[in-house]
């Protein structure tokens, strides 16, 4: 039988203490350590670690789009001072409007009509609930039930309309088109810093007025009487006004507001292209380009799509290569991230939330907010060490925080150890934002590194699997941006930890770093796999289980080298308990994952080459033990089609392979099985796995057929036949004393045992 795995805490090899690096550990009186009690950790099978990594990692970490190219709350003022004060002054709970001396400041400016007309050429009206045919019959370009149609009806009736929406949805352009639609020919922009009560005094005759980004709050709401007064003044002046506010305005009474939502990205891009010189290319053909479709997969700000339309036109004219179209998404993400972190509009608390969201993109919102506050406390210690972190418990609403981050909330079922749970998750609208943001913070703002490193070390020891996995995925993104620093500050210290969670974080980080295209990861694994320090060996061995199928031949060769190096070192004091078993676990995970890859069992595929290469290694010695352990571990995972054992699934699929590759693979798998069943140390484990396979085949005709083809290949000798016949005839399923029907049917696939 295979011995159970034991933790290295009992290993005889004395190991030097790991260097914690130049940054302190986050544990302390303000942020106590998040790990469980000593001894509470249980070693996880290599295949289970691989399954958890892929389950909890953000989707972009495992996709080619993640491989980036190129380089990479204000406080209240109390009191009044100064020689002249204009605007609102808040004293205590009341608001007093002061006008001391004359107000000679200009509070409006002209918007040129030519600018509005140029905007109208590419403006696209969103669809609505009305009839497009009726709209066209009236000569309108919009539908009555659309956001534009609703706002226009209000503007025509009251001469004032309030348009709400996120800052990146093209709401300013929509407001100007509303003013144009009611017949305005002159336009003026009003100062959004004016109080609602002072707006009427700034209106001019025969103009379309726009107030963009007008702030509303509990202290300064937009009330019904404000709009009625404006409507009265606008009627007398023959003018109109559109007030543009945020997504969550404070509007009291019957004033109301119309939420603005732009059209879908393809429609917007089509609108921008319709008047451009496309050198004879059709708009439809250009929109069908894979590089263009990749940009349109998710909602983008209209301003970005306008810039992208210019690139498409330049490409159509032969002035821009396709690679520049493909890089547009990365460029846009970099511009947005730099605007967040280089400016002063976002507070430190906001920036901590953005970093947490980049780490926990596609994860539950409460988790992101909770751990973002922890990061804020660590950043505050750097920025203002003499002042304790003050976290606004009931500050900005979650909807506003998510909107400011240009992200979306959605409901999705998440698998947990207790079953599926419905969660409210959050993700950036642009999937490239997360990795771009982490890279920018790590390389562009190195002063934040001590806090970020301390935060990730804390996350890596969290009892929640998703938190630990996201710590590793973030370290992988940082390694892609700056491998030496990420290795020195995060991955190597994790590998040297005595805690299993930290060592698994190192393995996960290296695996995901390789997925992101980080160079030299295979070289790191080769060196660590035969290192003198057993902690580095353990990290490398587990990493091979997670990502070794990407270079399966090299991974199996490295694991075999580790087996032989272990034998050369000699003695249990020079290894960790269960070292051979974990090497075999990783090898089985690599071989099974390679067998799942497309074409892996075809001629020249990894599985078709690697499994047969194991057969000659069973002639004796440490190699034989390693191979037979690998086969036994490969029998367990049942992640194939319909819950079928992966190894049996590989045997079944090999039948359909043309040529000799499939036959050789099947013969090799059968030969390895026979060796397991005949070996005194492993036969009990092999027979137990075969019993599980037979029981599972009772509900899977394909698995039963595959077993019916495998069993005769195992019954080469009389002893082989007797062993398998005994297993099938004495198999029990539940409380029924008789063998399951599937066992009796499979018994018929074996030759009859010789008569005594």
Image (tube, rainbow, N blue to C red):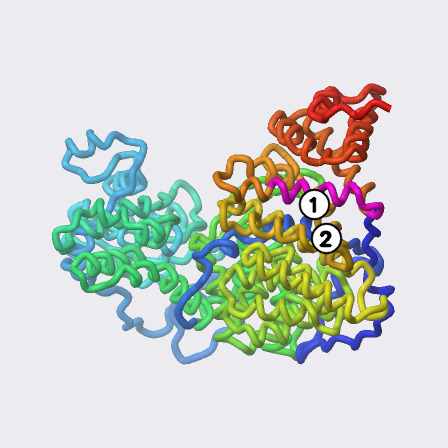
Residue 630: percent from left, percent from top: 71, 51
Separation (CA) of disc 1 from disc 2:
8 Å
Q: Residues within 10 Å of mark 1 (few under 14, many from 20)?
A: many
Q: Nearer the viewer, residue 234 or 1?
A: 1
| Residue 613 in sight here | yes
Q: Nearer the viewer, residue 52 or 714?
A: 714
Q: Is residue 192 left or right of residue 456?
A: left
The C terminus, quarter of image: top right
Q: Which label belongs to residue 703?
A: none
Q: Nearer the viewer, residue 510 or 451?
A: 510
Rendering quarter of residue 674: top right
- The residue segment tinted magenta is 666-681
The verdict on residue 676 being magenta is yes
Residue 735: percent from left, percent from top: 84, 22
| Residue 471 in sight here | no
The residue tagged with tag 1: helix, strand or loop?
helix
Rendering quarter of residue 713: top right
The residue tagged with tag 2: helix, strand or loop?
helix
Residue 449: percent from left, percent from top: 58, 74
Q: Residue at x 72, y 35 (%)?
A: 716
Whether label 1 touches label 2, CB < 8 Å:
yes
Q: Earlier in the sequence, mark 1 or mark 2?
A: 2
The verdict on residue 198 being magenta is no
* Figure disc tally: 2
Q: Residue at x 78, y 59 (%)?
A: 621
Q: Mark 2 highlights which residue?
A: 618
> Does 585 sit above or below residue 146?
below
Q: Is residue 643 left or right of residue 258?
A: right
Q: Mark 1 highlights which residue?
A: 672
């Amino acid at each position: 039988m295979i011995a159970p795995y034991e933790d290295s805490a009992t290993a005889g090899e004395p190991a030097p203490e790991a260097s914690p690096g130049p940054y302190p550990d986050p544990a302390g009186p303000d942020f106590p350590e998040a790990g469980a009690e000593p001894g509470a950790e249980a070693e996880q099978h290599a295949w289970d670690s691989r399954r958890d990594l892929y389950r909890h990692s953000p989707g972009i970490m495992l996709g080619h789009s993640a491989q980036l190219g190129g380089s990479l709350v204000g406080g209240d003022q109390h009191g009044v001072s100064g020689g002249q004060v204009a605007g609102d002054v808040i004293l205590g709970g009341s608001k007093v409007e002061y006008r001391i001396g004359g107000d000679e400041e200009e509070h409006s400016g002209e918007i040129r009509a030519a600018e509005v007309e140029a905007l109208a050429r590419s403006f696209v009206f969103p669809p609505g609930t009305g009839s497009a045919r009726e709209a066209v019959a009236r000569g309108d370009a919009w539908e009555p039930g659309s956001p534009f149609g609703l706002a226009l009806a209000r503007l025509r009736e009251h001469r004032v309309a309030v348009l709400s929406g996120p800052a990146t949805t093209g709401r300013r352009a929509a407001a100007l088109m509303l003013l144009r639609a009611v017949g305005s020919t002159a336009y003026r922009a009003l100062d959004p810093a004016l109080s609602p009560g002072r707006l009427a005094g700034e209106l001019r005759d025969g103009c379309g007025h726009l107030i963009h980004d007008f702030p509303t709050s509990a202290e300064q709401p937009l009330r019904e009487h404000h709009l009625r007064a404006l409507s009265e003044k606008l009627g007398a002046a023959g003018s109109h006004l559109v007030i543009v506010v945020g997504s969550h305005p404070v509007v009291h009474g019957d004033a109301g507001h119309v939420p603005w939502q732009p059209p879908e990205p393809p429609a917007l891009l089509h609108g921008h292209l319709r008047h451009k010189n496309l050198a004879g290319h059709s708009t439809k053909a250009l929109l069908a380009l894979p590089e263009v479709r990749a940009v349109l997969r998710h909602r983008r700000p209209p301003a970005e799509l306008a810039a992208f339309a210019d690139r498409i036109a330049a490409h159509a004219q032969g002035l821009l290569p396709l690679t520049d179209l493909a890089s547009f998404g990365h460029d846009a993400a970099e511009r947005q991230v730099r605007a967040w972190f280089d400016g002063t509009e976002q507070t430190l608390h906001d920036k901590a939330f953005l970093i947490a969201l980049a780490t926990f993109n596609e994860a539950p919102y409460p988790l992101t907010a909770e751990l973002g506050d922890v990061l804020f406390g660590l950043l505050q210690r750097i920025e203002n060490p003499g002042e304790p972190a003050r976290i606004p418990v009931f500050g900005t609403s979650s909807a506003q925080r998510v909107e400011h981050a240009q992200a979306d909330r959605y409901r999705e079922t998440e698998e947990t150890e207790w079953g599926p749970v419905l969660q409210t998750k959050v993700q950036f609208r642009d999937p490239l934002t997360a990795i771009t943001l982490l890279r920018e913070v790590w390389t562009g703002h190195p002063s934040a590194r001590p806090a970020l490193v301390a935060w990730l070390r804390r996350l890596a020891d969290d009892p929640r699997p998703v938190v630990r996995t996201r710590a590793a995925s973030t370290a992988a993104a940082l390694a892609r941006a700056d491998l030496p620093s990420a290795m020195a500050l995060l991955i190597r210290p994790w590998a040297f930890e005595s805690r299993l969670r930290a060592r698994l974080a190192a393995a996960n980080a290296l695996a995901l770093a390789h997925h992101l295209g980080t160079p030299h990861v295979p070289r790191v694994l080769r060196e660590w796999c035969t290192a003198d320090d057993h902690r580095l060996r353990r990290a490398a061995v587990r990493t091979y289980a997670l990502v070794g199928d990407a270079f399966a031949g090299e991974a199996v060769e490295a694991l075999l080298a580790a087996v032989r190096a272990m034998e050369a070192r000699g003695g249990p004091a020079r290894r960790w308990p269960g070292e051979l078993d974990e090497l075999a676990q990783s090898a089985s995970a690599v071989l099974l994952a390679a067998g799942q890859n497309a074409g892996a069992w075809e001629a020249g595929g990894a599985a078709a080459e690697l499994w047969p290469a194991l057969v000659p290694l069973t002639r004796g010695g440490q190699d034989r033990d390693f191979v037979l352990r690998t086969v036994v571990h490969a029998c367990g995972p049942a992640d194939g089609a319909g819950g079928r054992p992966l190894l049996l699934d590989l045997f079944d699929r090999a039948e359909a392979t043309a040529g000799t590759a499939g036959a050789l693979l099947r013969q090799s798998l059968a030969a390895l099985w026979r060796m397991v069943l005949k070996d005194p140390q492993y036969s009990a484990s092999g027979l137990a796995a075969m019993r599980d396979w037979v029981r599972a085949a009772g509900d899977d005709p394909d698995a039963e057929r595959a077993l019916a083809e495998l069993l005769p290949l195992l019954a080469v000798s009389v002893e082989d036949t007797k062993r398998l016949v005994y297993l099938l005839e004495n198999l029990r399923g539940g409380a029924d004393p008789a063998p399951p029907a599937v066992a009796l049917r499979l018994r018929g696939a074996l030759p009859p045992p010789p008569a005594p």
